[in-house]
Image (spheres, coloured by chain):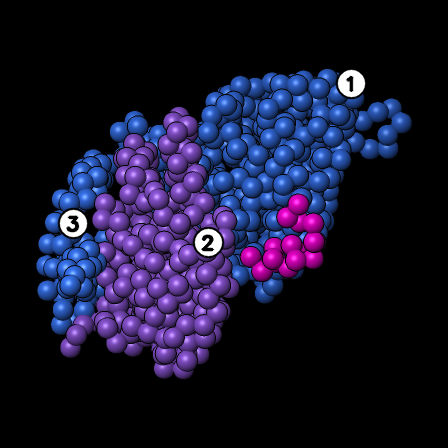
Amino acid sequence: MPELTRRPRVALFVTCLVDLHRPTVGFAAIRLLEQAGCQVEVPRAQTCCGQPAYNAGDRATARDLAAGILDAFSGYDYVVAPSGSCAGMISHHFAGLFDNDPQQRARAEALQAKTFELVAFLADVMKVTHVTGMYQGTATYHDSCSGLRELGIKAQPRALLASVAGLTLAEMAEPETCCGFGGTFCVKYPEISTRMVSDKTRDITATGADTLLAGDLGCLLNMAGRLKRENSPIRTRHIAEVLAGMTNDVPPIGEGRG
Amino acid sequence: MLATSPAFKQNVRDALADAGLQKALAFTRPSFAGRRAAAVANLPEFEQLRDVGRDIKNHVLANLDFYLETWAGNVEKSGGQVHWCSTADDARAAVLAICQRVGAKTVTKGKSMISEELAINEHLEQHGITPVETDLGEYILQLRHEPPSHIIAPAFHLNREDWEESFRKSHTDLAEDRVFTDRRDILTEARRKLREQFLAADVGITGANFLIAETGSSVIVTNEGNGDLTQTLPKVHIVLASIEKVVPTLEDACTFLRLLARSATGQDMSVYTTFSTGARRPDDLDGPGEYHVVLIDNGRTNMIGTEFQDMLRCIRCAACMNHCPVYFTVGGHSYGWVYPGPMGSVLTPGLIGVDKAGHLPNASTFCGKCESVCPVKIPLPKLMRHWREREFERHLTPQTVRTNLALWAWFARRPAAYRFATRIAAWTLGFLGRKRGKFHALPFAGGWTDGRDLPAPEGDTFFARYARQQRNAQP
């Protein structure tokens, strides 16, 4: 991608879970992108990346939704999502949906080259090394599967968390092991999913950390839900809330306003 | 082997409630991944070898007829015989015919997953021939009438107490004061019994890790040496091998040997690697008088030329299951047929039908760990997704799932309607959950809330808040 002489225009792909469940993550993403020097826009014609259909074997629906995103997100320098899973869907799977349509496939390939997960975009593209967020506590970070294995996100969140004043990072035993969310897997095979997330919360608890962070809301809802069921005091947040210093804006995931 | 894959969900519930199984899984889990990681770290070119391995297999699959014919010609040149078998029935009949012709009473067997696929032991027993498993794990499973739960560590789901119990029940000459405190005691007892069988056997059956086209050889790797005693002591050696085992050259076989043990057990090499070429020649000091290869398709050619062809690269190292969090939660028997774990979740629907094995490719989070450790880079999650597509096309996906998906898709295609619906949902759940921030139970959400609380949403959607913010920012 050629060097830009102006502020890059970034389209935020909010993700359906952030839209529905935790808008603060979207606003945290906007703040971080703006602080990094981006001009952020939020295309209105976006709903979901299509993974629920894609992973259920419904390619036709996945293709329809992908086509909508190709239309809504053309004309920006970058597309950024606060989720490795949704960013991975766009950047690794969209083109394959249009194998029989060279024109759309070319558009999908162009889109996938400029689509990034938020933290990786900040660190790798915008070369951000420090953030303004402050957080008093010890956090442990879970590597969500798509971000880790599809997009290679491992060092970037740790590097940016190291710049958060007051925050100490304590690694858990197997940060790269799946938490058992897996999209609709968690309700199609709830016994397996619950056992997997229980293994995960055991590793989280063993760190002694008071806060659990990750970059994907699906995994976070799963892990927070299990921690709450276990009456754990550990607070769960999306990494963007901490990096952007917006932890006072909203209670941790699964905790009430009193 | 009768498939219990359709009862996957019940198998899972049984497995989760089985304290002995869960103990064995927890005990073994860390060692598999740790050993592979250490072995890979010691071989700088391991990643390149994975590419080479993938490319060799792809080349073979694109020219399978050529390599199989070349290999078969060389088997015959070296005094062996090839039995081409399309189905499991054909293969069972071929094995039985050889055994009957030589008047076999006892048949020793090395570990072979394809023999499980053929259910060859049951077939031989029905015809008055006694098969004896000689791999330590397979031996105990035969005593217990259980199928293997893993493709290279078939009995790792058993604990020491299980071994002792099985020996005491089956070895009626066992002294009461014999102690079984460690592995060596178990091994000594099995060895005592097996030694008699090795010497008595009329026919030895092994699998094959590779067939080598340029020499007509078959290769097995073992850690116990039982395979060598199985194939060299009896008068007749029968190799059971599926068609995708063929590699072009000795050099290629060596490439795979460098990948195989490291991926499987974290060893640089297995303890025994044995190449067999033809029958005993006049000047040979030992070896079998007859060398047969029963070459089996059993549904594999149906996968060639389809999106599932990549699966036929598999070299059965078990790295995928050794690193699979689902496998280590439910154990191998839950998958309900011969091949468990991620490779089984792709291969089993191909061999017994996705209508029977549909749960397997669905019971995956697509975490991708399996693909990341596969020595021949099989894109296992992608292939599982392809099975889900086949199910969706054939309307095998449960109707409730289809209905929910269609409803969701209707809204997701229409951003304005979607905005409206999500706003109502977020507001309602946010309002109901605002105090506690979570739900302990919710109608229709039992799949989630049986084991977890459901965190409550903030209450307003991002887009509603964003639109408000934009309006307020207008001058």
What residue is shown with label 2?
A4
Q: Give the CA separation, mark 1 to mark 2.
A: 68 Å
Is B41 drawn above or below residue B148 in the view shown?
below
Range drawn in magenta: B33-48
Foreground label between 2 and 3: 2
Quadrant showing the N terminus of chain B: top left
What residue is shown with label 1?
B77
Measuring from the top left, give residue B116's x and y in whole percent: 52, 35
Helix, strand or loop status at disc 2: loop
Observer able to see residue A225:
no
Helix, strand or loop status at disc 3: helix
Q: Give the CA separation, mark 3 to mark 1.
A: 73 Å
- Nearest to the observer: residue A144 or residue B337: A144
In-image side of B299 versus B436 (left or right): right
Q: Quadrant of residue B216?
A: top right
Chain of the residue that carries numbered disc 2 in the rendered image:
A
Decide: marks 3, 1 in contact (CB < 8 A)? no
Quadrant showing the C terminus of chain B: bottom left
Please tell me whether the stretch drawn in magenta is mainly helix, strand or loop.
helix
Chain of the residue that carries numbered disc 1 in the rendered image:
B
Is B256 drawn above or below residue B36 in the view shown?
above
- Nearest to the observer: residue B380 or residue B141: B380
Q: Quadrant of residue B195?
A: top right
Give chain B's shade.
Answer: blue
What residue is shown with label 3?
B419
Residue B41 in the magenta stretch? The answer is yes
Tell if the residue under mark 2 belongs to the same chain as the one under mark 3.
no
Give chain A's shade.
Answer: purple
